[in-house]
Amino acid sequence: MPLAQLLALSGILAPLFYVAATWLTVWLRPEYSLVLDSVSQLANVSEPFGILFILAGAVPVGLLMVTFAYSLWTALPDTRSMLFGIVLLAHEGIALIISFGVFPRSGPSPGALHVGAGLYALACGMGARLLLAPSLRSLGGIFFPLTVAVAVAIPVLFLSAARFSPTPGLYERIAHALLFTWMAAVAVPLLLRPEEELSPPPAP
């Protein structure tokens, strides 16, 4: 399997890691509500098994997002907007690792550094998808409107619905479902693309 296709598997693996880590941690914490409680509360290191979600879910997902960004760089048309989008997409994954792995929630309040890193991830993710949308047309016409819609919907869900709703966990998980659906949808044509169409970017 060519390197670009092998790396594109990260777009499939990221949702699997997230779902498996969520399911396992919730199973060990029956008092936790997927609808009422936020994702950061699931990773609260002052609660039982919070570190489990961080090590088995948040950190691997962040690393897989960086890998996925690299896989796009090897396969998409080489344009300036694509390059900036790739950088921001990698920063989204890194910020996720920092938010949960370096500055995790500890106690009833999420903490300024945890929230700040999370907001940075949101901003990078939105910018990345808006910049990548034109280049993703090379994978199929549906990917431009899909990518733009996901880019706008995720921060809206996090900053409005999840913030002011009594069920923040529900809206956060809808946002994550959109993110991972987008990653998997983009990964599929990369995995099915003929090897001769997966040309690496030119050397500097």
Image (spheres, rainbow, N blue to C red):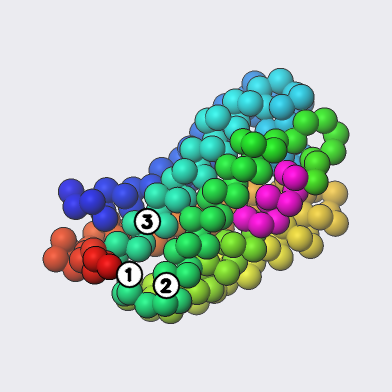
Residue at x-position 41% and y-position 43%: 13
Residue at x-position 49% and y-position 55%: 90
Assign a secondary structure to mark 3: helix
Question: Closer to the camera, 79 or 198?
Answer: 79
Q: Which class describes the residues within 10 Å of circle 1: few (<14), some (14-19), or many (20+)?
A: many
- Residue to which mark 2 is pinned: 82
Label 3, label 1: how far apart the Cα atoms are: 10 Å
Q: Answer with left or right where residue 201 lies relative to residue 148.
A: left
How far across and how far down the image is residue 127, in percent?
Answer: 57, 69
- Residue to which mark 1 is pinned: 76
Q: Which class describes the residues within 10 Å of circle 2: few (<14), some (14-19), or many (20+)?
A: many
How far across and how far down the image is residue 172, in percent?
Answer: 69, 51
Dots 3, 2 in contact, CB < 8 A? no
N-terminal of the pair, mark 3 or mark 2, is: 3
Quadrant holding the C terminus: bottom left
* Residue stretch in magenta: 113-121
Residue 116 drawn in magenta: yes
Label 3, label 2: how far apart the Cα atoms are: 11 Å
Q: Amino acid at mark 2?
A: Met
- Reply above or below: 133 against 43: below
- Residue to which mark 3 is pinned: 70
Res 35 quadrant in image:
top right
Question: Closer to the camera, 190 or 128?
Answer: 128
- Examine the residues drawn in magenta and state their main secondary structure: helix
